[in-house]
Amino acid sequence: MKAKSKQQQKAAGAALSAKKGDTAKSSLKGASKDMYESMSKSELEDMASTSRKGKPRKKD
């Protein structure tokens, strides 16, 4: 699944970083914490790799 907004893409990147062990899980908040718990590493990689160009800042 591709990210639909810049914020969604950034949250997926933060969750992926925690999943890889680069950042602490305790530093996650909100959507990134939910993504960490509910999505697999491959799903997060797919969403985080989405280009931000042309995406709205926030999904309506």
Image (cartoon, rainbow, N blue to C red):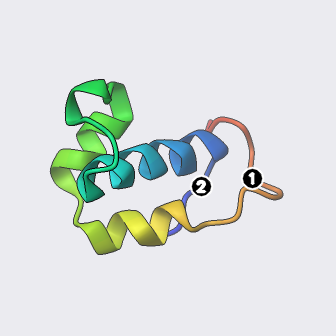
Element type where label 2 sits in the image: loop
Q: Which kind of residue does numbered mark 1 sit on? A: Lys
Residue 1 visible: no
Residue at 59% over, 55% down: 4
Q: Find the residue positioned furthest to the left.
A: 37
Q: Find the residue positioned furthest to the right.
A: 54
Image quadrant where residue 49 sits: bottom right
Q: Is residue 24 above or below residue 5?
A: above
Give the quadrant of the C terminus. top right
Q: Which kind of residue does numbered mark 2 sit on? A: Lys
Q: Nearer the viewer, residue 55 or 24?
A: 24
Task: Left or right? Give the position of 1 relative to 52.
Answer: left
Q: Position of residue 55 (x, y in %)?
A: 75, 52
Element type where label 1 sits in the image: loop
Report how far apart the C-alphas of labels 1 and 2 lie in the structure.
7 Å
Give the quadrant of the N terminus. bottom left
Residue at 24% over, 59% down: 39
Task: Left or right? Give the position of 10 relative to 52.
Answer: left
Residue 29 visible: yes
Task: Left or right? Give the position of 39 relative to 13.
Answer: left
Name the residue beneath numbered marker 2: 4
Image quadrant where residue 43 sits: bottom left
Q: Earlier in the sequence, mark 1 or mark 2?
A: 2
- State if disc 2 and disc 1 touch (CB < 8 Å): yes
Q: Position of residue 32 (x, y in %)?
A: 36, 38
Task: Left or right? Give the position of 57 relative to 49.
Answer: right
Residue at 33% over, 25% down: 29
Q: Residues within 10 Å of mark 1 (few under 14, many from 20)?
A: some
Image quadrant where residue 57 sits: top right
Q: Nearer the viewer, residue 9 or 1?
A: 9
Residue at 55% over, 51% down: 9
Name the residue beneath numbered marker 1: 55
